[in-house]
Image: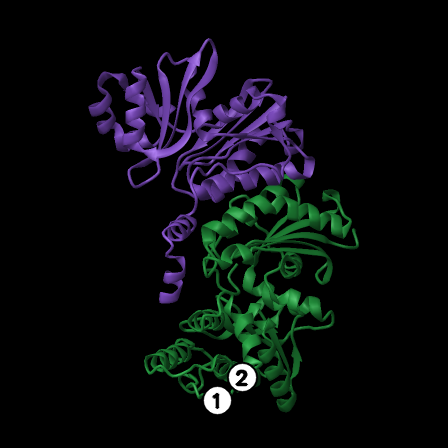
Chain colours: A purple, B green
Amino acid sequence: MLVLGIDTSSSSASVALLDDGQLLGEVLVNSTKTHSQKLLPIIDQLLCNCDVKVKDLDLIGVATGPGSFTGVRIGLSTAKGLAHPFNIPLVEVSTLEAMGYNLVFADTLVCPIFDARRDQVYTRVMAWEQGLLKTIIADENCLIDELMDQLEALARPVTFIGDGVLKFETRLKERLGERAIMAPQNTRMPRGSSVAQCAFDKPENARRKYDDVKANYLRKSEAERTYEENQQAGQGAELSEKE
Amino acid sequence: MKKNLITLAIETSCDETSVAIMKNGRTVLANVIYSQIDIHEKFGGVVPEVASRNHVEKISQIIDQALEEAQVTFDDIDMVGTTYGPGLVGALLVGLSTAKALAYAMEVPLVPVNHIEGHIFANFIEYPDLEPPFLCLVVSGGHTHLVHVMDYGNYEIMGKTRDDAAGEAYDKVARTLGLGYPGGPKIDKMAREGNPEAIHFTRTYLEKDTFDFSFSGIKSGVLNYVNSARQKKEPLNLPDIAASFQASVIDVLTTKTIDAARKAGVDKVALAGGVAANSALRQALVDKCGQEGFEFFYPSLKLCTDNAAMIGCVAYYDYLSGIRGDLNTNAVPNLKIGDK
């Protein structure tokens, strides 16, 4: 069973091909080029090197976020476009869940953190227990302080991955002391192989048709939030009058 | 050699998700348009992030709908055409990424298309016998251009707006008058009840011999008129304001179009773009072209709005002239007409 994994939810783009759980190849590019420029070329590079055509694929796992809104959509649109002509099943994979596979069998909690600006993070807390990845705290968009409160309450060592490590390392160490472990750089980025493995491990009922996959933004657009705040404050009418 | 070329075309540059299936350049087998206009109405304009989110949710369904309507399958598709600019970058990227992946998976050529050229080419779909050269006035929410279409793929931009696009001026005036979004159709409708000569708003023609436009002055004229009347607590006759504003915009557009057509030495004039749906503008150009001896062309309403059929039409002619996209093709939000 051939599984293609795609992740473009952060600054890096990564794709991988699994055959019955065995990794045939993986490409990761963390350059400043846009995903639109680098994603399809690396998919082509991977498939050509493995002598695989798109129509040979049995499953496409796609990271649906959270992360860069545009990045997530490029990955999702590409996955949908590849799957559509051959009706290849798609599996939605949380970017954060897939990152649990970057640190397989870690004996600490695994906590990916993505910088979501304004002191916020996209995060999830997981643990490997007897060969299975368990979710301790589901995907959330919260303040870094709120995450640290939650981790302090859990009172267990935590290994941090994700692009948020660079930004929050000092604060995490100050607050959590020796329980905060920063994973090596090479394990911090989302990986196509993790997405592919995660998709492969999911039960059959997780497979979706190409028109039935959705992004996992975890956050509404700025305009929607402002609109809702105004509605709640009963200022909607007032504001539009001022304009 | 296969007789007919079938194109699957995708357009997502703003707030319409559209997919078309075209036979050769000018035969529309399907042109499905999903408009997000209701979604953006409460925000008073198109919100790029919201538009992009809706595109990615809808695109696959719209593709299926187009294939079904056209009664073709992916096996019948010879190429994929897609808008890659100008437009909202996040919105463009959804259609472009989907198109690139489809073309790659099906192993057919990808043809990246300029959205503005698409608007012009809507006329080729409407009039199967229309051939260049002609002069085209392209007016939409984001663009106001006078284009000398010398041949397929060969354009000279004779004039363009230096500030607001005509459609933008409509939207802003509509907001001031409390008519809501989108402004164009609302002003057009209200203007029918008003007197276009009730108020004289200054027409901006810029320097002699230029075919460029400026609509910020006309827009400000209306805003000042409304504000000063409100301060003096004078009643506002909205239909008169709408009709007078519209008359001033249309005067400038038609005058410059006829002058440019004469300068270009063509005997045909075409209208294109979202604002081409404006009934008063159509009528003014019908009259003026008739008086001045130009043959006048304008697309039906469905082909004026953003739609993928017009993109498929450009894709076909660009394909014939050898234009191809590749795996690296990126969105170009400020793409100019004629750039490849």
**Mark 2 crowdedness (10 Å alpha carbons): few <14, some 14-19, many ≥20:** some
Q: Quadrant of residue B161?
A: bottom left
Q: Can the viewer see residue B141 in this picture?
A: yes
| Foreground residue among B200 and A61 | B200
Numbered label attached to residue B198: 1
Is residue A67 rendered to the left or right of residue B7? left
**Kind of element beneath mark 1:** loop
Identified at 26% across, 17% down, the residue is A179
Write down the chain letter for disc 2: B
Q: Nearer the viewer, residue A117 or B336?
A: A117
Q: Which amino acid lies under the numbered mark 1 shown in the image of this protein? A: Ala
Residue at left offset 38%, top offset 41% = A32
Locate residue A225, reporting x and y percent.
40, 48
Residue B266 in view in this figure? no
Q: Is residue B329 above or below residue B201?
A: above
- Labels 2 & 1 near each other (Cβ < 8 A): yes
Q: What is the distance, in whole Å, between disc 2 and disc 1 at their CAs?
A: 8 Å
Q: What number is the disc on residue B194?
A: 2
Chain for disc number 1: B
